[in-house]
Amino acid sequence: MTQTTGGLGSPPQEAVGFIGLGVMGRPMALNLARAGTPLVVWNRSPDGAAVLGAAGASVVSDVAAVFARARVVILMLADEAALDAVLGRGTPGFAALVAGHVLVSMGSNAPGYSRDLATDILAAGGRYVEAPVSGSRKPAEAGELVCLIGGEPDTVAEVRPLLAPMCRETLACGPVGHALLMKLAVNLYLNTMLAGLAEAVHFADRHRLDLATFEAAIGAGPMASDVTRVKLPKLVARDFSVQAATADAFNSTRLIAAAARAAGLASPLLDLASALYGESVGLGNGRLDMVSVLAAIEARTEAIAAAPAAGREA
C-alpha cells in the first residue's frame, strides 16, 4: 500500500483509493485531493480522471491498481450493477481484490443489496461501510454534503475522518442498511418537495404571474431553504443543466417505493412524484437536472388541453 510523507514531524499519510468520477464523484475526489489526501483514482471513462491528475492524484489504468496501492477504497458509482462489475462480484477475482481492504460505498443503492455486499466482503476478508450522501453537484463542489454512514462501529470510526473534506456533517445511522434507509427517507422528502415546487412554478406561470415575484415570495417565507434557493431559479429560467440527474431521481423514487412495499407502507405522494420523474425520463430528460420534472407536468397540462379539442373533432 502506498504512503506519502506528511509535514515535518508528522506520520506518513496512507493513500486512499477513489473509483467513480462522475457528476458527484469528481468534485468529491477533488476536495479530498485539495485537502492533501493522497489519492489513487480510476474512472471507467478516462476523461473523467484528467482533472484529478492535474490536482495531484495518481491516475491508474485499472481497478486492480487502485486496490494494490490503497487499503481504503471509496466507491461513488451509479448503481448496483456498476458496483458489482467494478468489484468483479460473483467472479473468482472478487475475494482476492477486496481482502484486507476497507470499502466505502457512497452511492445510493437498495439497503438489502448493501447488506448482501457487506456479507460478501466480510467473507472475503475485507470490511465495508455504506456512506451515501445527501446533496447535489453544488454542495459536492463546496464540500457541503451531508453523509449518512452505516457499518461496524470500529470501521465507521476509522473511515469518518477521511470524509471530512467532502462533507460538512457525517451522521452515524447504525448498522449497514440503516444509512441507506435514512437516505431513502431524506430523498422521499426531497423528491416530493421538488415535484411540488415544479408544479407551483407551473401554476404561477400559466396564470401569467410574475415569476420573479413568485420566487421572492418563496424566498421571504417559511418554505425557503437551500433547495428552493438552488432549484427555484433553475425552474424559473428553465435551466435544466445537471446538478442531480432526473434519471437518478427516478431511480431513487423506485428504491424508496420498493422499501416502502417491503415494509407494507403506503407512499402516495412518492408514487405520484415517481410517475412524474419517469415521464420526464421518457421525454428524453434522463441526464438533465431533476427540475426537468417540470416538463412532465407541462406535458400533462397539454394533454388536458388537447382532450376537449379531440372530443370536438370526433
Image (cartoon, rainbow, N blue to C red):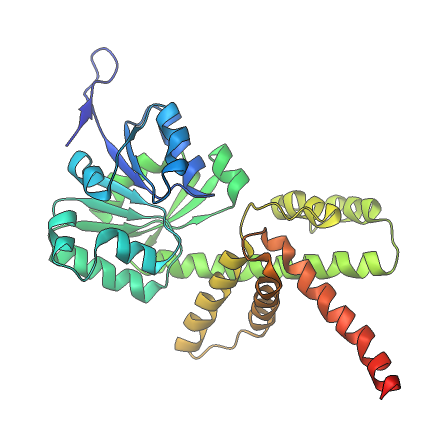
Q: Is residue 117 left or right of residue 202?
A: left
**Residue 9, relative to residue 3: is it above or below?**
above
Q: Residue at x 19, y 42 (%)?
A: 64
Q: Residue at x 88, y 85 (%)?
A: 312
Viewer can see residue 263: no
Give the mark count: 0
Q: Residue at x 34, y 63 (%)?
A: 111
**Residue 220, relative to residue 34: is it above or below?**
below
Q: Nearer the viewer, residue 298 or 128?
A: 298
Viewer can see residue 233: yes
| Residue at the extreme front | 313
| Quadrant of image for the C terminus | bottom right
Write down the quadrant of residue 21 in the picture: top left
**Coordinates of residue 296 in the picture (x, y in percent):** 67, 64
**Coordinates of residue 31 in the picture (x, y in percent):** 41, 30
**Coordinates of residue 214 in the picture (x, y in percent):** 81, 49
Q: Nearer the viewer, residue 22 or 10?
A: 22
| Residue at the extreme bottom | 314
Q: Residue at x 24, y 60 (%)?
A: 117
| Quadrant of image for the N terminus | top left
**Residue 215, relative to residue 118: is it above or below?**
above
**Coordinates of residue 136 in the picture (x, y in percent):** 52, 45
